[in-house]
Image: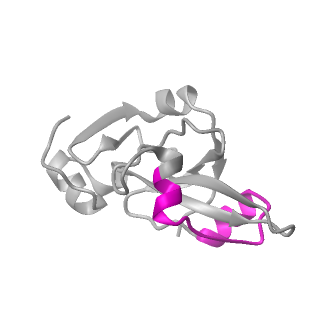
Amino acid sequence: MVHPPEGQTVAASLLRGHSVEQAAKCMVVEVKHDNGELSYALAVVSGHRRVALKKVADCFRGVKAKLAPSHVASQLTRCMMGAVPPISFDDRLQVVVDRDLLPTPEIVFSAGRLDVSIGVDTGIYLNAIRHQIGSISE
């Protein structure tokens, strides 16, 4: 669906005409491991939830996590922030979907642009991507 550009979850949900619970909010998270190495996760949560960074770190056996710097997130996703879809085309970016998003029949998300969105059956989405499931929201 095409709509005016919007990168904020609540405002985008209003423009697209769906509940904020249906929005798939995506955040690139940098996970630090005990050996000092970094890995990156694409955390996907329902639009009314927040990404719990410590829970993301735990999913990837890290010691701590923070939002990735915007230049790193843009490089890994090839998207501007606010337009990141819940899909990774980079092997360095692993997708983790919040368990609380699973009961949602359809999710809606930005299609890599602030003015274009996609709605898809949640089961079809999960079958189409490599991901892990975790309890990563609060």
Q: Residue furthest right?
A: 35
Asked if the magenta segment contains residue 52, the reply would be no
**Rendered location of residue 89, percent (x, y):** 54, 35
**Rendered location of residue 32, percent (x, y):** 73, 67
Above-or-below relation of 1 to 101: above
Q: Quadrant of the N terminus?
A: top left
**Rendered location of residue 132, percent (x, y):** 66, 44
Q: Residue furthest left?
A: 4
Can residue 17 be seen here? The reply is no
**Rendered location of residue 79, percent (x, y):** 39, 47
Asked if the magenta segment contains residue 70, the reply would be yes
> In which quarter of the view is residue 7 placed?
bottom left
Q: Which residue sits at x=63%, y=34%?
A: 130
Q: How is the image coloured?
A: one colour
Q: Which residue sits at x=26%, y=62%?
A: 10
Residue 37 is left or right of residue 19, and the answer is right
Above-or-below relation of 24 to 34: above
> In which quarter of the view is residue 106 placed?
top left
Above-or-below relation of 31 to 40: below
Residue 42 is left or right of residue 61, and the answer is left
The answer to which of 46 and 129 lies nearer the viewer is 129
Q: Which residue sits at x=52%, y=70%?
A: 138
The residue segment tinted magenta is 53-74
Count of numbered badges drawn on the protein: 0
Can residue 128 be seen here? The reply is yes
